């Protein structure tokens, strides 16, 4: 799940559509058409249910492509809208398809969507029955009154059976109980992640779940001291992911700064965009005088003596936004990579090993923390050779 798969109702829609696809024995093309028409209709019923304006947080996917083609008097040209509301051939299923399959509510067989290992409840199928009947018909036009009749499927309309079904799948429980042997590895991992998040909220509170997770899991002693988090290996992996995210975000901000600077001359005096050499000089101008060692010493240790992560990056983020701040965040990531790159990370084999695996990732990539760490080692090697040469030459 992510910020582009944020509506529970779409998971239920695809599960019900998969049942319809099997019932009608639709091939890949038929399934694609069914899903596109269903997505258009879900947006249309949401608009029809909200004549005074759609509430914040309930804007359906494809709203911008459906709204201009929906008339209170004439209804909806379903055929034409289904062709143009999304440029992707499979519409928003492209976003929800993979997590829906991992969740086990939809199967995917050579382009044909079929029911997954978890059966879609009859009450959920009934919720979408009017909408899917319209989607599966050969109708080109749908009247506004028909959209109103299918309005129970609109976002925000309650359905207790849908809620209980999806909640049980997300938490890997049946009748309020979790039996690990009844669930697959991805189910157990998802359940553990939700337990980590819930524990972070319980311990930290605050206004943001993301903030609670970061404050509780990313730093400090919770991985070893808290009875819930210390028993969940996923907590260590989340620490590694959250720490890596600081480096990813720093690169994004640096990239944005460079993109902004590229056209500065063009916008001011009509000259050409800045060259790579000029951009490099501009970035160097943002860096104060000093040595790499002095900068790293200023950052301080990224782990305490017991191996717990020290919140270096949050301290840097409190400074005014500037390229130099983000360069130091990247250097902090390089220091974290060094702890695992040469095998000297504290307490090998304990939960911190899970942190390092998630932080470094499964493979080395350009610009990742190990790449930064290699730059740091390269800089030290250059300085060391230059120092020896200077000593031999009497400098």
Image (cartoon, helix red, strand yellow):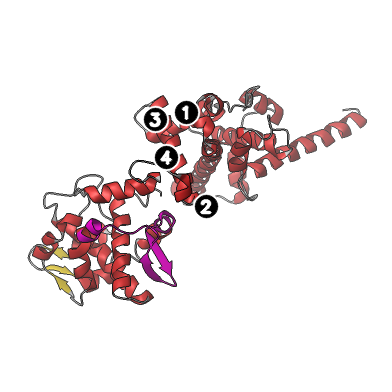
Q: How many marks?
A: 4
Badge 4 crowding class, 10 Å Cα cut-off, few under 14, some 14 to 19, many 20 or more, is some
* Magenta range: 99-126
Earlier sequence position, callout 1 versus callout 3: 3
Marks 1 and 4, Cα distance to the nearest angstrom? Answer: 14 Å
Of mark 3 and mark 4, the one earlier in the sequence is 4
Task: Name which of mark 4 and mark 2 comes first in the sequence.
Answer: 4
Q: Residue at x 62, y 29 (%)?
A: 288
List the residue tagged with mark 1: 216
Which disc, if any, is residue 194? 4
Marks 3 and 4 sit apart, C-alpha to C-alpha, by: 11 Å
Q: Are marks 4 and 2 in contact (CB under 8 Å)?
A: no
| Label 2 sits on residue | 273
Q: Nearer the viewer, mark 1 or mark 4?
A: 4
Residue 173 vs 23, above or below: the answer is: above
**Residue 153 rendering spot, x and y as whole percentages:** 20, 56
Near mark 1 (Cα within 10 A), the count class, few <14, some 14-19 or many ≥20, is many
Neighbor class of circle 2 (other Cα within 10 Å; few <14, some 14-19, many 20+) is some
Q: Secondary structure at mark 2?
A: loop
Lower position in the chain sequence, tag 1 or tag 2? 1
Q: Earlier in the sequence, mark 1 or mark 4?
A: 4
Dot in front, 3 or 4? 4
Q: Is residue 10 above or below residue 283?
A: below
Tell me residue 3's x, y (percent): 38, 48
Q: Is residue 312 visible?
A: yes
The quadrant in which residue 207 appears is top left
Q: Nearer the viewer, residue 91 or 201?
A: 201
Task: Determine the CA span between mark 3 and mark 2.
Answer: 47 Å
């Amino acid at each position: 799940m992510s910020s582009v798969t944020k509506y529970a109702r779409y998971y239920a829609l695809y599960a019900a559509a998969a049942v319809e696809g099997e019932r009608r024995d639709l091939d890949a093309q038929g399934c694609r058409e069914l899903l596109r028409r269903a997505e258009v209709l879900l947006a249309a019923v949401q608009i029809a249910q909200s004549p005074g304006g759609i509430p914040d947080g309930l804007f359906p996917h494809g709203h911008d492509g459906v709204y201009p083609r929906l008339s209170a008097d004439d209804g909806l040209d379903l055929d034409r809208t289904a062709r143009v509301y999304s440029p992707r051939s499979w519409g928003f299923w492209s976003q929800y398809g993979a997590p829906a399959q991992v969740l086990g509510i939809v199967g995917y067989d050579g382009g044909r969507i079929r029911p997954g290992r978890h059966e879609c409840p009859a009450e959920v199928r009934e919720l979408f029955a009017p909408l899917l009947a319209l989607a599966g018909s050969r109708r080109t036009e749908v009247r506004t009154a028909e959209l109103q009749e299918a309005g129970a499927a609109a976002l925000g309309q309650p359905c207790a059976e849908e809620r209980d079904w999806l909640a049980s799948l997300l938490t890997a429980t049946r009748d309020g109980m979790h039996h690990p042997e009844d669930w697959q590895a991805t189910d157990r991992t998802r359940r553990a992640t939700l337990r980590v998040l819930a524990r972070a909220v319980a311990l930290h509170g605050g206004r943001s779940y993301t903030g609670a997770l970061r404050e509780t899991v990313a730093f400090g002693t919770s991985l070893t001291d808290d009875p819930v988090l210390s028993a969940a290996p996923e907590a260590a992996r989340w620490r590694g992911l959250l720490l890596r995210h600081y480096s990813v975000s720093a690169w994004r901000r640096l990239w944005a700064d460079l993109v902004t600077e590229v056209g500065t001359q063009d916008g001011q005096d009509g000259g050409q965009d800045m060259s790579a050499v000029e951009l490099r000089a501009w970035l160097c101008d943002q860096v104060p005088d000093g040595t790499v060692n002095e900068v790293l010493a200023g950052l301080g240790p990224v782990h305490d003596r017991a191996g717990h992560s020290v919140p270096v990056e949050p301290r840097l983020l409190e400074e005014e936004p500037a390229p130099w701040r983000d360069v130091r965040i990247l250097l902090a990531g390089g220091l974290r990579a060094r702890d695992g790159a040469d095998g000297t990370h504290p307490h090998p084999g304990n939960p911190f090993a899970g942190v390092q695996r998630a932080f470094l990732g499964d493979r080395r990539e350009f610009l990742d923390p190990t790449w930064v760490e290699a730059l740091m080692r390269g800089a030290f090697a250059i300085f060391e050779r230059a120092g020896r040469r200077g000593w031999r030459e009497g400098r």
